[in-house]
């Protein structure tokens, strides 16, 4: 009887582990690395003045590619201001040694929004930049999907905006993805290192950190979870208290040989 | 005060009616379990050292040298998991806590001897699972298993998470055992303030193990549930919150640093008064500061999350509490130094190790204050500065504390004496190697070298090379130090029962201690550091 119970337990554990790989689909907002692959050079976008440009025309040097939507109230701003701050301190000069491309994945964003963001963030970098150094691009849904798909970024429209990952991709001048830089804060050396690899055309594995996502959070909607955790926490503390009372109460130690 | 000579022979002698193997693998003797832990933990430590050494070697030239970037990423996950979960967290409590705690309080064994053996089996099972992930394709999540990446990676993260979960159980069982033992099995006259400070430290640690480890367990269970059934606790795509994962993770994992460091500090608190031949300065302050570190240390987890999109107010409070932890730690350091002041210091191997611990730990602690400051943290976050800081704390602190304890209690455990000259020279080279390896990392971090990279920019090459040379010295010194002890275990001179002239109970029994520790349970009539009458 006992043996059978153990057997079925082991089977269950095995089954659970074998199922692991299927529980997650690709539709979730996130990032699937496509290092070594080419971004669509023919995809058309509008620059800050509304002029139509293709990625191929822009990519004359290695480039840092970031995605944002200009109506974002949260993570995109952190990403862009941290990127601006890192750019202000890199050894190479943006525009001369490399380019920065920020592409909006919201088809509703306009070149005016882009121009406004550009003014703010180039100013935030504290560094003089040429007109072409940091481009803020907007485009139609087709171009957006082609580019984000090729770069492995997936995002999802929600009531309040978008759920999307926070990360940079670094491209070589021929449009291949060299590596990703995860997170929302960057060291100048992160960018310099990736650009060096891009100029050498050397594709490397990214440092897999937590993929940070930007999402609108509604703690109220997860009350069930918070109460589960609260119950678990109270349970642990009650256990600790009962245990403390058990070990201190009655039967004073040291009175007799306990064994 | 001699309790030796029970006539039963030492715990190392053969048990009648039992084979050699079963007498070890099925033992419920706390001393034998301690030795089992020592041997298994040291084997995993060697594996961790090899990974660390190879990672350093990879950086000898730019670009891929001896391994590819993905291999390097797997190596640092394994180095981290092995060193933290298989070496640092269990090492001092499981080895010396098991071996010494019952003897130090005048008991024959821990309160739950079978549970104690079970905890070793849990430890080995967890370790085996962790090694399995290495064979079937290592997890690439880093030792933190941050969600949502850990939820999605196709690597063997489930198994790695499960391994850590099992190891957590081992830790909880040990904690429950020690707390109960200290409360219930103290010898007559062994009042709370006659407990050796190592017992206090182990006791405080045991509480952290009991209270904090279940949080990690729950968290990892949720990660597994999420990977298996997609319940959506941490995954924002399903309305979950990845920040919650980080909170739960660090609520355990910051106090875990104190699980590593506190017992090591306890060992230092034993060594310093013995070699200063003086009652320890501020006994109660040290005892309470152990509890203080355990308590305040539980309130600082947020400082690992300053850049995770955290409310500013919360960040300020976490920063403040982080400064508070420095107080009980500093109390200990001042009291050790105060104990040495005007003591009749006997310079000997364990004391040298203790001094190196104090020095390296202080550097680690002070650099931690720099990181704890919110403003600076933003610049140094994720640079080599952080790597240097936690190696000074974990290696320079916890591991050197363990080495000190090992050299102090080795004669008691093995009944043999090691070659002190070799031990002293190994320490000298350990010290040189350690600082050559890790000090340049402070400078590299300050100059902006990001951590975790398998490559670096040309301007960092010189310091990287210096650091690599340091790793060679360090590994050679480690090899000599361990070799010296292994040789002594087989061929060393027989050690007397009390080679250092200490006053605590474990030195009043034979070396190695008899099976039941004491012929008759001793009655304790004085404090643990009362040297007036001599041992």
Image (cartoon, rainbow, N blue to C red):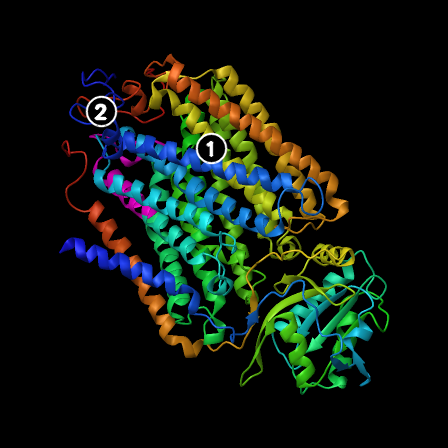
Which numbered disc flags the more N-terminal residue, 1 or 2? 1
Q: Which chain does the numbered disc 1 sit on?
A: B
| Left or right: B277, with B443 as reference point | left
| Left or right: A102, with B122 as reference point | right
Q: Within 10 angstroms of label 2, few (less than 14), some, or many (20 or more) residues?
A: many
Residue A49: quadrant of the picture: bottom right
Q: Secondary structure at mark 2?
A: loop
Residues drawn in magenta: B170-197
Q: Secondary structure at mark 1?
A: helix
Question: Which numbered circle lies on residue A204?
Answer: none
In-front residue for pair A29/B88 = A29
In-front residue for pair A22/B397 = A22
Q: Residue at x 67, y 62 (%)?
A: A36
Residue that numbered label 2 is attached to: B515
Q: CA distance from mark 1 to mark 2?
A: 27 Å
In the picture, the quarter occupied by the C terminus of chain B is: top left
**Residue B48 drawn at (x, y percent):** 50, 39
In the picture, the quarter occupied by the N terminus of chain B is: top left
**Residue B342 drawn at (x, y percent):** 50, 21
Q: Which one is closest to the eye, mark 1 or mark 2? A: 2
Q: Residue at x 73, y 82 (%)?
A: A138
In-front residue for pair A181/A240 = A181
Residue that numbered label 1 is attached to: B401
Q: Is residue A39 above or below residue A47?
A: above
Residue B106 in sight from this viewpoint: no
| Left or right: B390, with B199 as reference point | right
């Amino acid at each position: 009887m006992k043996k059978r119970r153990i057997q079925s337990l082991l089977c269950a554990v095995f089954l659970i582990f074998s199922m692991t790989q299927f529980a997650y689909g690709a539709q979730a907002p996130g990032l699937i690395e496509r290092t070594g692959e080419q971004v669509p050079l023919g995809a058309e976008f509008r620059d800050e003045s509304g002029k139509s440009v293709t990625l191929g025309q822009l990519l004359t040097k290695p480039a840092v590619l970031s995605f944002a939507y200009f109506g974002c109230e949260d993570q995109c701003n952190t990403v862009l201001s941290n990127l601006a701050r890192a750019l202000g301190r890199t050894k190479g000069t943006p525009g001369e040694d490399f380019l920065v491309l920020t592409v909006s994945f919201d088809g509703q964003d306009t070149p005016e929004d882009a121009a406004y963001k550009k003014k703010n963030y180039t100013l935030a970098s504290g560094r003089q930049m040429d007109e072409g150094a940091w481009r803020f691009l907007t485009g139609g849904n087709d171009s957006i999907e082609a580019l984000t798909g090729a770069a492995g970024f997936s995002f999802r429209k929600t009531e309040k905006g978008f759920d999307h990952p926070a990360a940079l991709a670094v491209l070589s001048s021929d449009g291949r993805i060299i590596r990703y830089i995860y997170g929302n804060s960057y060291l100048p050396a992160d960018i310099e290192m990736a650009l060096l690899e891009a100029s050498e055309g050397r594709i490397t594995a990214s440092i897999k950190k937590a993929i940070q996502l930007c999402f609108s959070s509604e703690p109220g909607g997860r009350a069930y979870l918070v109460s589960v955790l609260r119950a678990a926490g109270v349970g642990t503390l009650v256990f600790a208290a009962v245990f403390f009372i058990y070990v201190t109460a009655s039967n004073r130690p040291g009175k007799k040989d306990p064994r | 005060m001699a309790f030796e000579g029970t006539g039963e022979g030492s715990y190392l002698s053969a048990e009648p009616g039992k084979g050699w193997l079963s007498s070890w693998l099925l033992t419920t003797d706390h001393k034998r379990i301690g030795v089992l832990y020592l041997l298994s933990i040291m084997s995993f430590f060697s594996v961790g050292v090899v990974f660390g050494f190879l990672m350093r070697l990879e950086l000898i030239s730019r670009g891929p040298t001896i391994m590819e970037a993905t291999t390097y990423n797997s190596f640092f996950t394994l180095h981290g998991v092995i060193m933290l979960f298989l070496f640092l967290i269990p090492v001092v409590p499981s080895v010396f806590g098991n071996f010494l705690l019952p003897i130090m309080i005048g008991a024959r064994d821990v309160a739950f001897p079978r549970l104690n053996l079970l905890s070793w089996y849990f430890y080995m099972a967890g370790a085996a699972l962790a090694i399995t992930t290495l064979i079937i394709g290592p997890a690439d999540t880093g030792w933190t298993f941050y969600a949502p990446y850990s939820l999605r990676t196709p690597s063997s993260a489930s198994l790695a998470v499960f391994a850590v979960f099992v190891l957590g159980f081992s830790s909880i069982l040990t904690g429950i055992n020690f707390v109960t033992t200290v409360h219930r099995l103290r010898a007559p006259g062994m009042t709370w303030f006659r407990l050796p400070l190592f017992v206090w430290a182990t006791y405080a640690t045991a509480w952290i193990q009991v209270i904090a480890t279940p949080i990690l367990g729950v968290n990892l269970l949720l990660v597994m549930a999420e990977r298996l059934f997609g319940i959506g606790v941490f995954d924002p795509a399903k309305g979950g919150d990845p920040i919650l994962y980080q909170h739960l993770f660090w609520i355990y994992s910051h106090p875990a640093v104190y699980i590593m460091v506190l017992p090591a500090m306890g060992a230092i608190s034993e060594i310093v008064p013995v070699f200063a031949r003086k009652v320890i300065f501020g006994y109660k302050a040290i005892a309470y500061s152990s509890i203080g570190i355990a308590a305040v240390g539980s309130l600082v987890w947020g400082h690992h999350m300053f850049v995770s999109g955290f409310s500013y107010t919360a960040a300020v409070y976490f920063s403040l509490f982080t400064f508070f932890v420095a107080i009980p730690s500093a109390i200990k350091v001042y009291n050790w130094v105060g104990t040495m002041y005007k003591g009749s210091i006997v310079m000997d191997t364990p004391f040298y190790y203790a001094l190196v611990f104090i020095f390296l730990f202080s550097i680690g602690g002070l650099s931690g204050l720099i990181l704890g400051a919110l403003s600076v943290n933003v610049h140094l976050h994720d640079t080599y500065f952080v790597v240097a800081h936690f190696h000074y704390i974990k290696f320079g602190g916890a591991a050197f504390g363990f080495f000190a304890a090992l050299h102090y209690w080795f004669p008691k455990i093995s009944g043999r004496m090691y070659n002190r000259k070799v031990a002293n020279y190994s320490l000298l080279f350990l010290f040189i190697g350690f600082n050559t390896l890790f000090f340049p990392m402070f400078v590299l971090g300050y100059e902006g070298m990001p951590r975790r990279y398998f490559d670096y920019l040309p301007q960092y090459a010189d310091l990287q090379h210096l650091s690599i040379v340091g790793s060679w010295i360090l590994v050679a010194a480690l090899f000599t130090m361990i070799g010296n002890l292994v040789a002594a275990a087989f061929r060393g001179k027989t050690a007397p029962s009390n080679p250092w002239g200490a006053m605590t109970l474990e030195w009043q029994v034979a070396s190695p201690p008899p099976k039941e520790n004491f012929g008759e349970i001793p009655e304790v009539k004085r404090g643990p550091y009362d040297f007036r009458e001599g041992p």
